Every structure is written in structure tokens, then in C-alpha cells.
Image: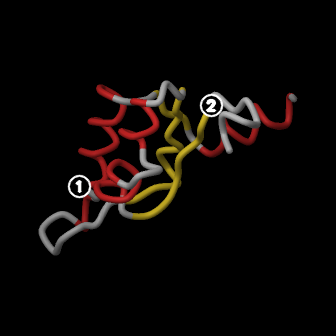
Amino acid sequence: MLKHRKILHLFYAGFATNICLIHRDYGMKAMADRGYNMILIRDCTSALESHDTIDQMLTTRLFIQDIEWRLACSTTSDDFIAACDQG
């Protein structure tokens, strides 16, 4: 459907960044392999945290950093909204 509609840029946000956003069949790894440009909205996502990481959102921060290094650019929701308002 994305190819048919000539969509090239995908924005990602949601829960379970460390599982769903990266590893699902529609996740960032699969879409990178298909040649899509991806942008993570970093303040609109979170990973599955544990009792040791939740206070500082360490798992979320680690996976956002990993995505920025290996898979995609990122932005904030404020910048995304501002860019949409300019269009």
C-alpha cells in the first residue's frame, strides 16, 4: 500500500519501542530494508521498562539512541507539529 501510494517517509511513535517499533513486520528494521526514510518522534514513544529503569526511562532512552545511530532520524512532537503547520 505504501509503494502504491508513493509514500517514502514514515513517522514512528508508540509503545514498546524496544520490541514493536523496531522488530515487527511493519517495524523500523523491516521498513529500512525496504528503503523507506523513517523519523522517530522520540517524545511520543516509550520502551518496556523494568523496576530498575523506569525512574529514568533508561530503556527508552537507550533504544531511542540506538535507533538514531542505526536506523532513523528523530524529532520531537513540537517540531513535527510545527513542520505540519508550515505545509
Residue 36: which numbered mark, if any? none
In the image as oriented, which residue stretches furthest toward the left? 52
- Secondary structure, mark 2, is strand
Q: Secondary structure at mark 1?
A: helix
Q: Please state the horizontal and vertical placement of residue 79, each as a whole percent of the image.
A: 66, 35
Q: Quadrant of residue 71?
A: top left
80 sits left or right of 76 in the view = right
Q: Earlier in the sequence, mark 1 or mark 2?
A: 2
Q: Residue at x 28, y 58 (%)?
A: 57
> Which label sits on residue 59?
1
Q: Is residue 23 left or right of residue 7?
A: left
Q: Are marks 1 and 2 in contact (CB under 8 Å)?
A: no
Residue drawn at x 69%, y 32% as measured from the top left: 7
Left-right relation of 69 to 6: left
18 vs 10: above or below: below
The residue that disc 2 covers is: 9
Q: Amino acid at mark 2?
A: His
